[in-house]
Image (cartoon, grey):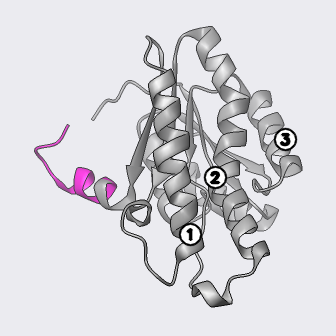
Amino acid sequence: MDLGLKNKLALVTGSTAGIGFAIAKGLLEEGAKVVINGRTQQRLDEAVAKLKSAGNALGAVGDLPTAAGAAQVVARVNAAGPLDILVNNVGSFEVKQLAELEDADWEAMFQLNVMSSVRMSKAFLPGMLERNWGRIVFIASEQSAKPNPVMLHYAMSKAALVTRVSRSTACWLRRPGAKASRFSSTKWRIARASPSRP
């Protein structure tokens, strides 16, 4: 399949394992140059080594829930060239009931699952608009619509990301060139498995 991504520069956040790693591998196989991101240099180096056979993979270490970590990743990406594709994948969940959740738990989940995507999008969107081409993808979750009662803070963060950040960004970008969209992991699996989908 040719998605027209040859020589495009992509960043996939939180991509040393799991969904992010798979997305990075898919982009590399389409001919894109991909920057993968992780919190530790060791895990990042291991992931880059695994992806080398698929294409041109680079690493950018940085903890995205922090402004300093985000700035570190932005600097690494900018050194590689103007970014064409941003996949806001980084995120995590935690199983805790409401009575067990402290204020710090809510704040940490919001910083990781929402503000990391906000920081990355804010950093790279102006360049995409200037070049009149770009793609921003937000990785969503069904928890945004069907919250698990023992994952309230995770569901809150994904609802904020899907119904406010990604949707508002997509509406604002109703213009030629740059686009924003969102996918849940369930929809991604269906799209990959179904031969009837492009």
Q: Can you say which quadrant of the picture contains the N terminus?
A: top left
Q: Which of marks 3 and 1 is in front?
A: 1
- Residue 159, above or below 86: below
Disc 2 on helix, strand or loop? helix
Residue in view at x 47 percent, y 48 percent: 162
Disc 1 on helix, strand or loop? helix
**What's the CA distance linking mark 2 and mark 3?**
16 Å
Disc tally is 3
Q: Which residue has dot 3 on it?
A: 71
Callout 1, which amino acid?
Tyr
- Of the two numbered discs 2 and 1 on the same chain, state the one appearing first in sequence: 2
* Magenta highlight on residue 191: yes
Disc 3 on helix, strand or loop? helix
Q: Which residue has dot 1 on it?
A: 154
- Residue 139, above or below 185: above
User: Can the viewer see residue 21 in this picture?
Assistant: no
Q: Residues within 10 Å of mark 1 (few under 14, many from 20)?
A: many
Q: Position of residue 82 (x, y in %)?
A: 68, 22
Start-end of magenta stretch: 188-198
Q: Can you say which quadrant of the picture contains the C terminus?
A: top left
* Magenta highlight on residue 20: no
- Of the two numbered discs 2 and 3 on the same chain, state the one appearing first in sequence: 3
Q: Which of 10 and 180 is in front in this view?
A: 180
Callout 3, which amino acid?
Ala
Residue 114: which disc?
2
Callout 2, which amino acid?
Val
Quarter-wise, where is residue 148 in the image?
A: bottom left
